[in-house]
Every structure is written in C-alpha cells, then in structure tokens.
Image (spheres, rainbow, N blue to C red):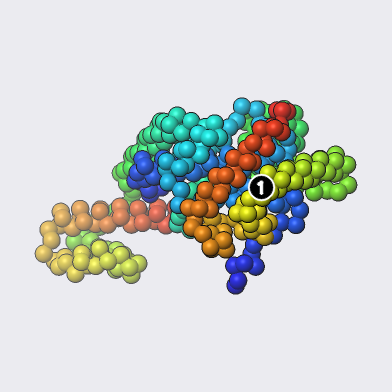
Amino acid sequence: MNLKDDRKKAATDSEFLDNLTCFFKSFEDLDETALKEELREEGINPEELLLRTKVLIEAKLKQAKMSWKNAAQEKKELVLEQLSSVKYEIPRNAAELRKKIKELLNKFTADQLPSYAQAFYRNLDQITDEDLKSFYSDLKKLEHLKEQLKNEDIK
Amino acid sequence: MDRKLIQLLSEIKESEWDKLILNLTRYAFYEMERKYWKYERVPKGLTAEDIALESISDLLEGIRKWDYTNQPNLLNFLRSAVDSKISHLFEMKDYKLIERFPVTEDDQEREELMKKADPVSEHACFSPADPQNPEETLIQKQVSERDKAAVSALFEAVKGDDQLENLFMLIMDGYMKPSEIAEEMKIDVKEVNNLQKRLRRKFKKLRSNTKPKEKL
C-alpha cells in the first residue's frame, strides 16, 4: 500500500488547522532541553511539571505495589485455609494406598504436568506407610489446587 | 494492575518518565489549543499539565488499562488517553444534562452505563453532525468562519518566507511528520523542527490576539 494515499489532504480551512495541529504535536529528534524550552515558551514550567509527576508516580506505584501485595497475601491465606479444609479419606490398606497414589500420578502426567513424572517413576514399594500417607495427602491437596485453578480459568 | 505491569512501570527510568511527561504535556497542549480555537471555550481550571498527569494517574490506578502486549508503546497509549480526555472535556456539552438526574451512592448501574456509552451518539440530545439541529449548524458556521480567518491570517504571516510557504503547502497536502516533510523539502529533520518552532511562534502571536475569553 502506498503510504502517501493515507495522507489526509486538507479540503477546508478547518482541516488545514487540524493538519497543522498534528504537525505541531509531531516530534522527531527533539531532546529534553528542546522540549523544556518549547514548554517554557508556552507558559509551562517544566521543572515544576517533572516534580509533580515524580511525586505522583512514586506515590501511585507504591500504592499499586501495596495493593498487589495485600491481594497476594489474601489469596495465599485463602488457599491455605482451603487446603486445610480439603476432605479426603486415606485408604488404610498399603496396597490400596499405593494404587490410589499411582492413579493420581497417572492423572497428573496425563494432564502434562511433567514435575509429577519424576515422582511417577519413584519406587513406591520402598516408601514407608507413613510416608505413603503423607505423599497421598499432598497429592490430594495438589489435585484440589489444580481443580481450583481450572475453575478460575473458566471464570 | 497486575504484577507484571507494576514491574514494567517500576523499571522505567526517571529520565524516561521525564521525557515521556514532557512529550505528553506538549501533545496535550497543542490538542487543547486547537479545541480552544474551535470552540472558543476552555474547561475551567484545567491545563495541559493536568490532563497529562491525569492520564498517567489513570494508568497507575488501573482505571485505564494498558494492553502492553499488543500496544507496547506507552507514549502512544497515553496520547490516546489524552485525546479521549480532551474530547470528553470539550465535546460533551450534554454531560451536565445527564447530571441533572438524581445520583445516589449505590447508583452503580448508571455509572457503568455512563462509562460504556458513546458520549455523542448515546448521550446527546442532538448529534453535532445532525444537520437538522439549528444550534449545531450555527456553531459549525461560526467555527468555519473563525478557522477561515485564522488560516488567512496565518498565510498572511508567512507570506514572503519561501520555506514556511512550502511547509504550509505540504501540511495542506497532509504531510505532518517532520521526517516526511524533511524528505520532501530535502532538508534535515532538525531544520524542520526549527521551521516548526518559527511557525509556532507566529501562530502563538495570532492566538494571543484572538484568545478565547469564555470559560465553561
């Protein structure tokens, strides 16, 4: 496409003044000193303007960071609270427990969660019953978290 | 504001912010000047600096969302915010009419509608472009007459200055970028900047003789 075709030729005096305003607003190769000088000519104090902006930016960014931190902390607390209330039954039988763990690991690897793949190949027979229970609890909590994240994505 | 945006804005150096605000204020100034000329009224107490700072404030408060992935140029984003603010200030003459309705603290729905609605087509009693609106027709006529007088005075002011006359012809033809003008005039961009400065001074002189008195 020829760029020149996009130019807005001024057909009226008003359009000419619109074009002139666009020309005034355009700048290329104007350094800070030239910009300040131009603003001063138009009755704007650039130093005062920059000071006002600096104060505003510092305050607003600080506020935004605080809001984000607070929101993140609230979310963390909510997740921890939800995790502590996750209900699940731990099979008493060790063989059943191993079977359930393998099922969960299969589910995670099927969902392409590679961090669980390593755990999948762990020899569950060498883990004590207590560790199996703890491992199962962690997996159930992860399953819950994964569901939560999926639901949030849907929303 | 999301974490990535906060980080992105925090990483902008002070010198970059400085240049950005100077550019943005300059931009707001000329846009407002054009509107003053057009409408012969100025929004009470608001300056180009205020508009530029408000636009930055809206960004930092998350009121106006910056799509930094698809529109990475922050200055361009802020310029569009300035355009929108200035248009809102000068062109929403019907705004006060809407405000006559009682506003309650929990009138959230109305507030949301106000934010979404097109200020011209959905709020105005008459569209400014509506030729059936006699008041608008009169205003348009007055604007055209003022613009005509301004252009005549400007042409008179540059008469005899070959470079400025050439520049005027190029602007008339739709050339507005200094680099394009420099190419057409076979001069350096810095020279175009100097021509711009000379032209601004002539325009300013003209403005000072016909400065609008009425305030909104």
Q: Secondary structure at mark 1?
A: helix
User: Residue A39: percent from the left, percent from the top?
Assistant: 51, 37
Residue B14 placement, left or right of A45: left
Callout 1: chain: B
User: Depth check: A137 or B141 in front?
Assistant: B141
Residue A139 placement, left or right of B9: left
Q: Residue at x 33, y 57 (%)?
A: A143
User: Residue A2: percent from the left, percent from the top?
Assistant: 60, 71
User: Depth check: A102 or B207 in front?
Assistant: B207
User: Depth check: A135 or A26 in front?
Assistant: A26
Q: Which part of the image, by quadrant, shows the C terminus of chain B?
A: top right
Whether residue B65 appears in this view of the structure is no
Residue B40 placement, left or right of A129: right
User: Residue B75: percent from the left, percent from the top?
Assistant: 48, 48
* Picture mark count: 1
Q: Residue at x 64, y 62 (%)?
A: A7
Q: Residue furthest bottom?
A: A1
User: Depth check: A133 or B190 in front?
Assistant: B190
> On the image, numbered disc 1 is attached to which residue?
B158
Residue B72 placement, left or right of B136: left
Whether residue B45 appears in this view of the structure is yes
Of the residues shown, which amino acid type is indicated by label 1?
Val
Figure quadrant of residue A68:
top left
Q: Residue at x 71, y 52 (%)?
A: A15
Q: Residue at x 47, y 42 (%)?
A: A35
Q: How many residues crowd around disc 1 within 10 Å: few (fewer than 14), some, or many (20 or more)?
A: some
User: Residue A106: percent from the left, percent from the top?
Assistant: 29, 68
Q: Residue furthest front?
A: B160
